[in-house]
Image (spheres, rainbow, N blue to C red):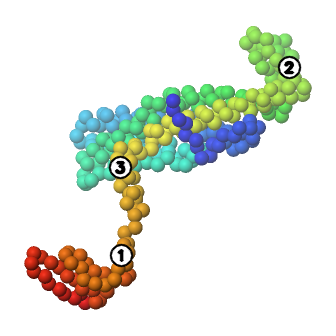
Amino acid sequence: MIALMPGSRLPVRRNPLRMLCSAAPWRATGYLAGYLVAGPALFAVAATGVVLGLVFMQFTVSVALTVGSAWVVRCCAQVERGRAVLVDEPIPYAYQEPTKPGLVEQLRARCADPVFFRDCVCLVVLFPFLLLLDLLALLVWLPLLAGVSLPLWFWSVNSTQADGSRLHGPWIGGPDDGDPGVRIDGWPTALLVAAVCLALALYASYLVVAAARLHLTVAHKLLRPPPDPLARAKRILTEPGPLALVSTGPRPGPTTDAGPTTGAGLATGTGTGLAPSTRLTTTTGLTTSEGHIT
């Protein structure tokens, strides 16, 4: 199961009334509606850039045009990343940069970059699915908002009948389709329909926010830098190890009286250091030597 991005500007409240009055559903509406306009334009530009890039790759003299096509796709991806500010922080990005000068290195760095292929998937391959997701969510949400505001404008709608007479008020499931419908021709009917739409809109706000979070999740999964497989190892190397908690200071020496020590021992005075008059005595075989440490 895909974990949806929370979205820093899409908080979900448990109270449906507070959820409807918060800014989350309205930000989600702007994010989804913006894709209905920007999505087709980005798809057309990115798909054209990909097709032209594939064509230009067949000709050696058009390497610069191939690099330009990849740059066009990158710009389209940047626009989609920037749209995320409506519901969250901008999506980060990281592209490979050419290590050597020249058009061939530019082509290799731009077209062989895994991020470039992820951009193409988000802008071209998944465009129909994202567009359908946003469209369905708005088709449920926006008619309910129109129904809530019905008392403000129902009186301005006029319809002409077959006999030439004119009726005031809109139809729900109108007579033009041959199905029985309801005509909103008075304040009581308009207020009743508005109350029903308001009750449904309280819960439809969760739907539109969930659709925006799903769209944001897909954009984050594809447009942000791919995860570093060595990130965990790098984090372990930078964190302090278990030995960092052990004190590395000088250990206090034993409290003994100053005196000679036979063998390889060291006579120390009272305290943590060596007294100036400490006598060092070493024995090697049958030879014994004494000295003073000053």
Is residue 65 placed above or below 55 in the rendered structure? Answer: below
The mark nearer the N terminus, 2 or 1, is 2
> Could you tell me how far apart the alpha carbons at marks 3 and 1 are, in whole angstroms?
43 Å
Residue type at mark 3 is Ala
Farthest residue, direction left: 286
- Place of residue 27 in the rendered image (x, y in percent of width and height, measured from the top left): 64, 42
Farthest residue, direction top: 178
- Mark 3 residue crowding within 10 angstroms, few (<14) / some (14–19) / many (20+): few
Task: Pick whichever, 120 or 252, lies toward us.
Answer: 252
The mark nearer the N terminus, 3 or 1, is 3
**Which residue carries the number 1 mark?**
254
The C terminus lies in which quarter of the figure?
bottom left
Front tag of 2 and 1: 1
Residue at the spot x=69%, y=44% of the render?
Answer: 23
Residue type at mark 2 is Arg
Task: Pick whichever, 6 or 196, lies toward us.
Answer: 6
Task: Pick whichever, 44 or 263, lies toward us.
Answer: 263
> Could you tell me how far apart the alpha carbons at marks 3 and 2 are, in whole angstroms?
76 Å
Residue at the spot x=24%, y=42% of the render?
Answer: 61
Residue type at mark 1 is Pro
- In the image, is 273 to the left or to the right of 245? left
- Place of residue 291 in the rendered image (x, y in percent of width and height, measured from the top left): 19, 87
**Which residue carries the number 2 mark?**
166
The numbered disc on residue 233 is 3
Answer with the quarter of the image where residue 212 lies.
top right
- Mark 2 residue crowding within 10 angstroms, few (<14) / some (14–19) / many (20+): few
> Could you tell me how far apart the alpha carbons at marks 2 and 1 are, in whole angstroms?
111 Å
SS at mark 3?
helix
- Count of numbered circles in the view: 3
